[in-house]
Image: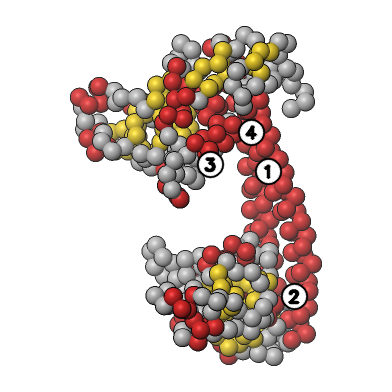
Amino acid sequence: MSHYKRYPVYKDSEVEWLGAVPEHWAVKRLRFTATLNPAIRLDLLDNQDRDVSFLPMEAIGEDGSLNFEQTRPVRDVRNGYSYFEDGDVAFAKVTPCFENGKGALMQGLLDSAGFGTTELTVLRPNTKIMDARYLNYVVQSPRFRALGVGAMTGAGGLKRVPDEFTRNFPTALPDRIEQESIAGHLDRETARIDALVEKKTQFIELLREKRQALITHAVTKGLDPNVKMKNSGVEWLGDVPEHWGVLQLRQTARLESGHTPSRSKPEYWVNCTVPWFTLADVWQVRSGEQKYVSETSEKVSKLGLENSSARLLPAGSVFLSRTASVGFTGILEVDMATSQDFAVWTCSRDLFNEYLYYVLLGMKPDFDRLMMGSTHKTIYMPDIEAIRITRPPMEEQKEIVHALGGQLVRFKSIIDRTECSIVLLKERRSALITAAVTGQIDLREAT
């Protein structure tokens, strides 16, 4: 930002958060620059069989992108949906979509018109004084978002930005020509930043694919490239070292599943001291980079455990999520119980738990084959019981774990650095937009 210059003269905007603005800029509330939630075009009402674009919330990206796959006849959507036209600016008003930046400048709509989720606020700029692209950057700006969050009404996940906040939001406004100049520069710079973010995101995805391939190769082929191989008879394993055992996992580790003590028994949920791992805790192991878990969002009581099918599982047990968030694995660092959403193995002396952890990570792509259900995905216990793995000699299991540990640390370091650079790019993008639409930088001669 340091290479941008400021305007030569500023004045007090008389808006506390806005501060000083360029002397020649006006400060207007949005209601004087745009129409909020405009009426439907009359020609659409006259011919309600014609198709128009339809945008549910999932068709609106957090990066301003739009998915035009869906269309609907006007008669089906004229009531109960938001309406917009090419050139309108729309943003999601409900949490968490508002905070995440869902919204867009509407362009490319079928017949230049569309309907969509009711959770949109639509602004139609007065083109004599407000450029649509500039208005879109105003509602994209972190200041608009932060103040909008503070003005939300409602409870829990149904909080919304009220229309009154949008109508009365004060906007720093240069003349139309300068707005176009600012918007043009922001278009170029944000596109450049977005391209860098996309490139870095793809790089991270490639690293994660290589990481997955490394783990799978280590637990199915070993570390010696010259070892003699045999057919395992298991599709996901393929050929494995000849001296390795291939067996059902339950033959070398005790398999258990968790349970939830009855919620209708309040006495089971007082004096809770036993860590209880549930799907709410899976976030800790989603990346595949955290091996051990010790913290849980909930605890259960000893009385609850005694009166359910759950039991206290020993530290060192290896778990696998098998419902909803399927295929995530980790190791219990302390004694704890789990919900029924997990399969848990306590390893025999012939199976190293950290080796099993990597085996389950390595077979993650195969879990898609085992999942059942259309919306609530589940791997059922008979399929869990049938899982077959390789079991090298114990010393070799530990060698594999040691080798993977060193290699995966390097992957994590590169991924972490790349993710940090993405965060910095996004922060720069936000700061640039804020500075531009509040007049803190002069873009009239910027290239």
**Disc 2 to disc 4, C-alpha distance:** 42 Å
Residue at 65% x, 90% y is: 348
Give the label on residue 227, or none.
none
- Marks 3 & 4, CB-CB < 8 Å contact: no
Q: Earlier in the sequence, mark 1 or mark 2?
A: 2
- Per the image, the residue denoted by label 3 is 99
Q: Amino acid at mark 3?
A: Glu
Separation of residues labelled 4 and 1 (CA atoms): 11 Å
Task: Give the colour scheme of this rendering.
Answer: secondary structure
Amino acid type, callout 2:
Val
Q: Residues within 10 Å of mark 1 (few under 14, many from 20)?
A: few
Q: Which residue is mark 2?
A: 401
* Disc 3 to disc 2, C-alpha distance: 41 Å
Label 4, residues with CA under 10 Å away: few <14, some 14-19, many ≥20: some
Q: Looking at the picture, which amino acid does disc 4 mark?
A: Ser
Asked if labels 1 and 3 touch by Cβ distance under 8 angstroms, the answer is no
Please say whether residue 362 is visible from this viewpoint.
Answer: no
What whole-number distance in Å separates the C-alpha atoms at marks 3 and 4?
A: 13 Å
Query: Horizontally, is 201 left or right of 309 in the view?
Result: right
Q: Position of residue 445 (x, y in %)?
A: 69, 13
**What kind of residue is marked 1?**
Val
Answer with mark 2 or mark 4, whichever residue precedes in sequence: 2
**What element does badge 1 sit on?**
helix
Query: Which sits in the foreground, 63 or 243?
Result: 63
Q: Secondary structure at mark 4?
A: helix
Task: Name the residue carrying label 1.
Answer: 423
Disc 2 vs disc 4: which is toward the camera? Answer: 4
Residue located 70% across and 83% down the image: 352
Are the residues flagged by discs 4 and 1 in contact, CB closer than 8 Å? no
Q: CA distance from mark 1 to mark 2?
A: 32 Å
> Where residue 402 sits in the image (x, y, percent)?
78, 74
Q: Which mark is residue 430?
A: 4
